[in-house]
Amino acid sequence: MFTSEEIVLLNNDWIAIIFMAIFFVLAVLNVFFGKRLVRTSRMLLTKSYVQTYYNKDKNKFFATFSSLLFVVQILTISLLSYLFITQFNLKEGFSNFNLFALILGITAVYFVLRYLIGLLLANLFQLKDLFLRLSFEKSNYLSNIILWCLPLLLLSFYLKIFKVNMIKITVLFFVIMLVFRYVLLLINNKKLILNNLFYFILYICTLEIAPLILILKLTI
């Protein structure tokens, strides 16, 4: 017979598998793109990253490095969302893995649709270059934040002491860094944004604020 603690551990084996998948992808990236991965982890501290890699990737819809980091992004964000929702009992009626699968699906669809709709709007307004640059910068800033958040997220799942406080710190850190990301985007691209202010406001309202409100309505 299993004790209740052993059953909980068995039911949470999938969490360990997700973390293993994340670190496996990072290991692959480290082998084939080690220098770039290191520079991504330091992106918030330097401006040279975008200038170095943007021209290489801007015409590649599925650049290998960006695609693999996208996998890390959605898995990590989904784990963080799952942890927050389950810890504070914001969603009931799902088994643990089914809830995570739902969050993962919503997260992946959100990012893909946001990119495709943004690309469509950019083409309509003849602002494709601006959109591609902002998307590249935003995505890589997000990857940078994810790399910093991963150790905190790991502790949030497996730390037995002060678990709730650790979760709050992790979520708060993630939110603060997202806000900081937008501040950097505005500072780094202020001339481009001011010259295309209408499109930027439309982009923020249509692809940043509205989808988040919809997802919160669906998940909470």
Image (tube, rainbow, N blue to C red):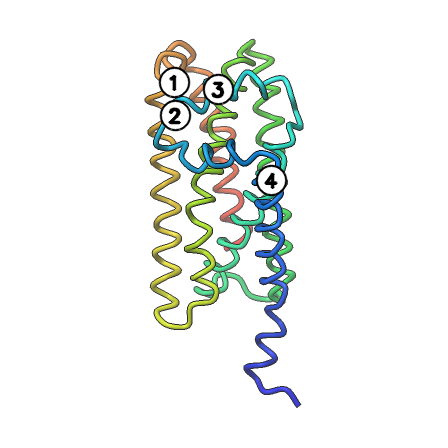
Mark 3 vs mark 2: which is more N-terminal? 3
In this rendering, the label closer to the viewer, 4 or 3: 4
In this rendering, the label closer to the viewer, 3 or 1: 3
Look at mark 3 in the image and give the residue it sits on. Answer: 52
Dot 2: element: helix
Q: Is residue 97 visible?
A: yes
Q: Where does the image place residue 69, in percent across and percent down from the top left? A: 57, 38
Q: Residue 116's image quarter? A: top right
Q: Amino acid at mark 1?
A: Asn
Q: Compute the Cα span from label 2 to label 1.
A: 6 Å
Q: Amino acid at mark 4?
A: Val
Look at mark 1 in the image and give the residue it sits on. Answer: 189
Please name the residue shown 58% across and 74% down the image.
Answer: 9
Dot 1: element: loop
Please name the residue shown 38% across and 18% down the image.
Answer: 189
Q: Residue 185, labelled with which disc?
A: 2
In this rendering, the label closer to the viewer, 4 or 1: 4
Q: Compute the Cα span from label 4 to label 1.
A: 32 Å
Please name the residue shown 50% across and 28% down the image.
Answer: 206
In this rendering, the label closer to the viewer, 4 or 2: 4
Look at mark 4 in the image and give the residue it sits on. Answer: 31
Q: Where does the image place residue 130, in percent across and percent down from the top left? A: 49, 15
Q: Amino acid at mark 3?
A: Thr
Q: Compute the Cα span from label 3 to label 2.
A: 17 Å
In this rendering, the label closer to the viewer, 3 or 2: 3
Q: Are marks 3 and 1 in contact (CB under 8 Å)?
A: no
